[in-house]
């Protein structure tokens, strides 16, 4: 039975020893909350709601531990927590702009979810077009692309097209987003 502010039953089977051996056991509440926020791209709506209802630090630590334990046990193709958080760090280093953390940008989100691109095409600003990038991920769905355009010239690249089945698809991306209006 689930009681508000406590762990859902599905995670009650983990032991204190397992938690104590994990990196999550020494995290302060702000850090645990931040690490769960980082996981928002892969957490389900139910998981987000359950986490938001937790009020005890230990329950949050257990939940985060179980969140990643379930994913690593269910499929070897799922990115583990170390790889995922490394992608967050790299996204912050590469894609932060102004006051926005890199993992919260479109390029950062794609990097965190799908990993680094295999190839990239960069097109600088010209008199006819805004700068844009085309990322190639060759090992996803037989090969996909992600297209990002910097419409304001400030380094804020927005995802405007992809051939990935779960992402934005806009065949007229060049005309609508990259082409400068004269």
Image (tube, rainbow, N blue to C red):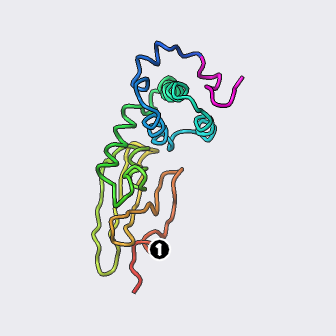
**In this picture, which residue range is highlighted in magenta?**
1-12
Query: Residue 144, how many percent across, how many down?
Result: 42, 51
Q: Which quarter shows the N terminus?
A: top right
Q: Residue at x 55, y 26 (%)?
A: 59
Q: Which residue is pictured at 46% across the width and 68% down the height?
A: 173
Magenta stretch: dominant SS? loop
Q: In the picture shown, does residue 176 fall above or below 110? A: below
- Camera-side residue of 93 and 113: 93
Is residue 7 rendered magenta in the image? yes
Image-based side of 158 in relation to 93, left or right: right
Most distant residue in the bottom direction: 182
Mark 1 sits on what residue? 176
Seen in the picture, residue 114 relative to 169 is either above or below; the reply is above
In terms of image quadrants, where is residue 11?
A: top right
State whether residue 16 is above or below residue 87. above
Residue 140 percent location from the top left of the image: 43, 44
Quadrant in which the C terminus appears: bottom left
- Between 32 and 151, the one nearer to me in the picture: 32
């Amino acid at each position: 039975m689930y009681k508000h502010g406590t762990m859902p039953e599905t995670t009650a089977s983990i032991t204190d020893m397992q938690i104590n051996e994990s990196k999550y056991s020494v995290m302060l509440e702000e850090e645990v909350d931040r690490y769960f926020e980082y996981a928002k791209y892969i957490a389900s709506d139910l998981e987000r709601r359950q986490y938001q209802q937790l009020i005890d630090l230990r329950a949050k630590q257990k939940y985060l531990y179980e969140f990643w334990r379930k994913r690593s046990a269910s499929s070897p193709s799922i990115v583990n927590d170390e790889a995922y958080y490394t992608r967050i760090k790299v996204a912050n280093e590469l894609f932060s702009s102004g006051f926005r953390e890199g993992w919260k940008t479109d390029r950062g989100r794609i990097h965190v979810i799908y990993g680094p691109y295999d190839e990239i095409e960069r097109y600088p600003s010209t008199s006819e077009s805004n700068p844009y990038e085309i990322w190639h991920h060759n090992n996803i769905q037989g090969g996909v692309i992600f297209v990002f355009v910097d419409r304001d010239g400030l380094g804020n690249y927005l995802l405007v097209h992809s051939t990935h089945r779960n992402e934005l698809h806009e065949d007229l991306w060049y005309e609508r987003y990259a082409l400068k209006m004269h």
